[in-house]
Amino acid sequence: MQEPMRVCVICDSRYGTTLELARAVARGAEQEGAEVRLCRVDIEEPEYSVDPERSDFQATLAEYRALPRATGEDLEWARGIVWGSPTRYGLMSTPLRAFIDEVAPLWRRGALIGKVGAAFTSTGGMHSGNEITLINLLLPFFQHGMVLVGVPHSVPELVRTVKGGSPYGASAVTGFDGTRGVDDNERAIARALGARVARLAGQVRPEPASVELAAYGY
Ligand SMILES: Cc1cc2nc3c(=O)[nH]c(=O)nc-3n(C[C@H](O)[C@H](O)[C@H](O)COP(=O)(O)O)c2cc1C
């Protein structure tokens, strides 16, 4: 039976690369016929972690702020959730992590059990943390009881890529000065991930059950 194809894409981004991946994921899901919400998390003011003089930071700020701020309601609405952030010190970014903490009440209610989850990230370096960040972005989905989705090698660009993109999710390698951007293979892999999440989101049925009640043996 066809279930509603509703996909929520949540991103953090300062220089625009992760946001570009998020837009590609969203486009892939839309092309598959899904209803998509593209959201952001918070931005700290002042932003200590980045170079605010960089032109790509200035250019991204307005675009990023214009996105709706993600809420728990977006996650409840969606059947597929794809989130991503820049890699920072081999980890996901603090604002995305804070958002994941913020939606803890959904975990207690088991509200995301049975939904589809996937991830994307952007790194400066080629071997500098992108795969481990993707894996870490996926771990909270396991905790929420979700069904995890990556990118299969039937996606031709995953075989061809010489930069980002992995079986663990979509990614981009931008170079340490950020000048390498997102290339066509990385964009295509992100679109394929969005399309796959949409297709699977149209097949799953959430299985909500209270985690707290389970803990008390009911
Ligand atoms: C505080 C900080 C920590 C970073 N840590 C890493 C890292 O561990 N590995 C890496 O490859 N790039 C690292 N980078 C580079 C970013 O991951 C890279 O610039 C990314 O493409 C930015 O994404 P955005 O364009 O969406 O902001 C770091 C950048 C900042 C500002």
Image (cartoon, helix red, strand yellow):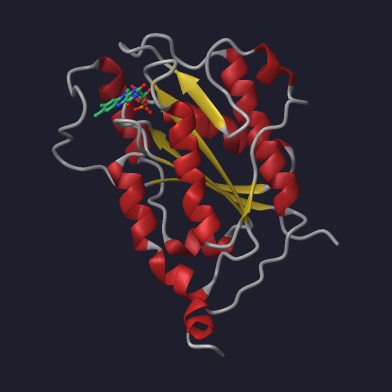
Task: From the viewer's perspective, tell me whether residue 208 is left or right of residue 59.
Answer: right
Q: Residue at x 53, y 79 (%)?
A: 210
Ligand 1: give its quadrant. Answer: top left
Taking the image as shown, residue 28 lies to the left or right of residue 214, namely: right
- Which residue occupies the extreme bottom position in the image? 218
Residue 86 picture location, percent across and down: 38, 31
User: Observer-nearest residue: 4 or 149?
Assistant: 149
Quadrant in which residue 166 is drawn: top right
User: Residue 196's image quarter?
Assistant: top right
Q: Please provide percent x and percent y for residue 68.
A: 41, 49
Q: Which quadrant: the N terminus?
A: bottom right
**Residue 206 appears in view:** yes
Q: Is residue 37 above or below residue 107?
A: above
Residue 127, compared with residue 22, is above or below; it is above
Q: Position of residue 85 (x, y in %)?
A: 40, 36
Q: Quadrant of the C terminus?
A: bottom right
Number of marks in the rendered image: 0
Residue 30 in view, yes or no? no
Q: Nearer the viewer, residue 44 or 49?
A: 49
Q: Residue at x 47, y 54 (%)?
A: 140
